[in-house]
Amino acid sequence: MDLLRFATAGSVDDGKSTMIGRLLFDSKAIFEDQLDAVERASRTRGTEYTDLALLTDGLRAEREQGITIDVAYRYFATPRRKFIIADTPGHVQYTRNMVTGASTANLGVVLVDARNGLTEQSRRHAFLLNLLRVPHVLLAVNKMDLVGYAEDVYERIREEFQIFAQRLNVADLTVIPISALKGDNVVERSAEMSWYDGPTLLGHLENIHVASDRNLIDVRFPVQYVIRPKSNQYHDFRGYAGTLAGGVMKVGDEVMVLPSGFTSTITGIDTYDGPVQEAFPEKAVVVRLADDIDISRGDMICRPHNSPRVTQDLDAMVCWMGERGTLRKGGRYVLKHTTRTVRAIVRDLHYRLDINTLHRDEAADALTLNEIGRITLRTTQPLFADDYGRNRTTGGFILIDEATNQTVAAGMLDLDKT
């Protein structure tokens, strides 16, 4: 079975946690003791029904306020596919949490309340999913039971969102009317919405094709660790461990190592389960080469005629996550990109982006918590990078505060415009 990672987004009280709870409950993906705990918590809060949102709202503050604050990850599987759910917060105050949860998602689910239609936050969440290059977007029009399951309400919201999505160049958009509280069109098809003939939420998640979303053309293998066993039995063994970030590597392929530029041939690919003839993205492997080349952590193995950009000057969109301090021109940070760690300085802050209006504030001189802007960085050593739209692994990075060692920003490289 393959794996689908998806993130939920929506305004406060749109029903994200309830939708995930319903998805887990109706697909028989929760244990009896979990359900008992949720039922007890529901009674304690005076709720007349079992509040399935409590399955994901794990923090005390979340349960007290009825909102999502931190990213909650849930795992479940059906006979067709395995799933990892990132329940991300909807409030602008927790933008950094949504960026974290959606950064690895194959699909983003944007929930809207059918009574309210599209809101400023709905557009903001769609923009963030587009900024993070989430390839598939699903608009779930929730709480249809509160508008009498009216088709015209659904059609109005669908048309409005499609017009907005065209401005963002969303490649794949699906719209589904649901009621997370009642279970309509979540796992089982709704008898109340006979006018809708599309898939249910779970049906869409099970059948959407995501394998082609991975970059299978550009071979990118950031070296994480060099394996040289001390045992006499393996005294000639030299392997390079890491996770394949792009392309397909096969035994016998000619490869090039950056930054040296030396070339060699792959003689073996080893995994935890034994040797294989080829490896695909997100597979952790050990690569053996025909020649002894000086290779260390942070180096990149790629194709001789298909290499990433080697540069020290980076244009990027960044989301500032630091609770203390701000990002300003001249700021110095530690930059971590794949397995390579270097020092960097902010050469310029081009603009701060208002993610509600998409207005660019070119007069801004700083980014504060949860703000997004475009910057130019200069690194002390070259990075082997791609545009974020081409490869989310080699196109993404984080900034770390040198004094506190805390992650203060997440960035997405825009090398095609450099």
Image (spheres, rainbow, N blue to C red):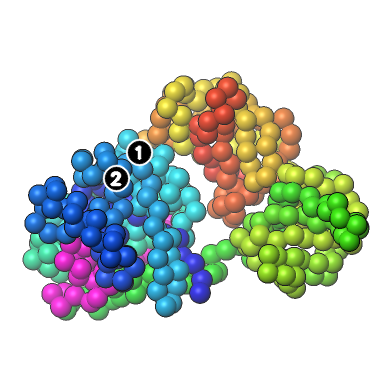
- Secondary structure type for disc 1: helix
Q: Report x, y in % for residue 83.
A: 43, 65
- The type of residue carrying mark 2 is Thr
Residue plotted at (60% across, 25% down): 402
C-alpha gap between disc 2 and disc 1:
9 Å
**Residue 55 vertical placement versus 310 (above, below):** below
> Hey, which quadrant is residue 81 in on the image?
bottom left
Residue 196 in the image, given as x and y percentages of width and height: 21, 75
| 105 lies left or right of 418 | left
Q: Which residue is mark 1?
A: 94
Kindly identify which residue carries mark 2: 68
In the image, residue 256 above or below residue 339: below
Image point (78%, 54%), residue name: 240
Disc 2 vs disc 1: Cβ atoms closer than 8 Å? yes
Q: Residue visible at 79% across and 50% down?
A: 226
Image-based side of 149 in relation to 207, left or right: left
Q: Quadrant of residue 272?
A: bottom right
| Residue drawn at (41%, 39%) of the image | 96
- The disc, 2 or 1, on the residue closer to the chain's N-terminal end is 2
Is residue 125 one of those drawn in magenta? Answer: no
Q: Main secondary structure of the magenta part?
A: loop
Boundaries of the magenta span? 166-193
Look at label 1 and name its amino acid: Tyr
Q: Is 187 one of the magenta-colored residues? A: yes
